[in-house]
Amino acid sequence: MTKAEEPDALIDRIIKANTQIPAKGCRAQHAKHGGHHRATFKVHALDDTDPALAQGLFATPASYTAVIRYSNGKEQDAAKPDVHGMAIKIHADPGERLLTDPDDACAIDFVLVDVDTFFSDDLGDYTIVNEKLVPLLQRKQTSDDAFSFWEALGGLVGTIFTLRTLDDALRLFRFRGEKEPISKVKRWHLEYSSATPYRLGDIGPVKYKILACEATSEASVVEVAFCIERPSNPRDVDIEMPSYSWADVSDLVTVATLAIETDPGSAPDLDVEHLRFNPWHVPPEHEPLGAINAARKKVYDTLADKRQREHA
């Protein structure tokens, strides 16, 4: 990368790659809905168990209403291996936000996937992936304009030969979550992670995780544990390398419970296409960390603006 390509120009290239081909909903990734649900986010009392974590959203025990959007990363068919998303919008107390959701000034968002690492450490590589593969993903997801084998091969080969190392390429093509067929609306049996790191007040970098639900799928409400993944020593992790797992150097602490209404008809009035999820819709205590997260702030916000204009 030249100096002129860091980092604003790279972010602009990512946005251009995501908007150059019209696509349903203007979501380059996770365009395919996998169900949406209303929920209650119950913050636990942490003063006695782990007072250092009682910051930001987790400072005070409380219950908040929430909305969940499940998604497929790229596949229309839930039976195919894929990365699966879980985006949560919590309607919390008013207060300062690093980025305000124009539709809900009180919103706090968590954006998670069923993989505990991200596929790229480098903003340049992240840009290349978007430029080479996003146009194909957009066409694949809409199913309106199927691409040929040779177009797909060209995109993959072009991506491999422009990434920095073979490891970068292999990490991208191994980036997938649950490999077994999953139900269209019953996705609480998966474990989700923020994959990228976040600040938690003054204790340093953390990730967020949701543990798989052990309740039966017939329950009208299922509960999943919302956890903080905290390194035993912050020096053991690098916020600029989200492709590495923290599992061996961190502990999980449950800080909240997410009670999900499982009836797929529980939110018939919810306009899912209109919702905008951004990891920067958070109080300052939960600031997203690293260059990848910095890019997501503008990319997600710009694409959400475009999507809402097209679906007004």
Image (cartoon, rainbow, N blue to C red):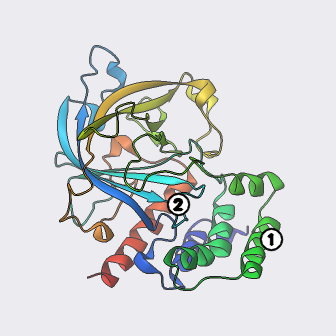
* Residue 229 place in picture, x, y as percent: 48, 31
Give the residue furthest to the top: 48
Looking at the rendered structure, the kind of residue marked 1 is: Val
- Along the line of sight, the residue nearer the viewer: 148 or 291: 148
Residue marked by disc 1:
157
At 54% from the left and 57% from the top, the residue drawn is 79
* Residue 280 place in picture, x, y as percent: 38, 55
- For the residues labelled 1 and 2, say whether their Cβ atoms are less than 8 Å apart: no
- Along the line of sight, the residue nearer the viewer: 198 or 133: 133
Depth-wise, is mark 1 or mark 2 nearer the camera? 2
Looking at the rendered structure, the kind of residue marked 2 is: Gly
Residue marked by disc 2:
73
Find numbered disc 1 in the image and state the secondary structure of the residue it sits on.
helix
User: Residues under labels 1 and 2: Cα distance?
Assistant: 21 Å
Find numbered disc 2 in the image and state the secondary structure of the residue it sits on.
loop
User: On the rendered image, what quadrant is the C terminus found in?
Assistant: bottom left
Sooner in the amino-acid sequence: mark 1 or mark 2: 2
Left or right, 283 with reference to 111: left
Give the residue furthest to the front: 218
Q: Is residue 91 visible?
A: no
* Residue 42 place in picture, x, y as percent: 23, 34
At 32% from the left and 70% from the top, the residue drawn is 273
| Quadrant position of residue 215 | top left
Examine the rendered structure and indicate whether residue 47 appears above or below residue 184: above
Please tell me how crowded label 1 is: few (under 14), some (14-19), or many (20+) other residues with Cα within 10 Å. few
Q: Which mark is residue 261?
A: none
* Residue 19 place in picture, x, y as percent: 50, 81
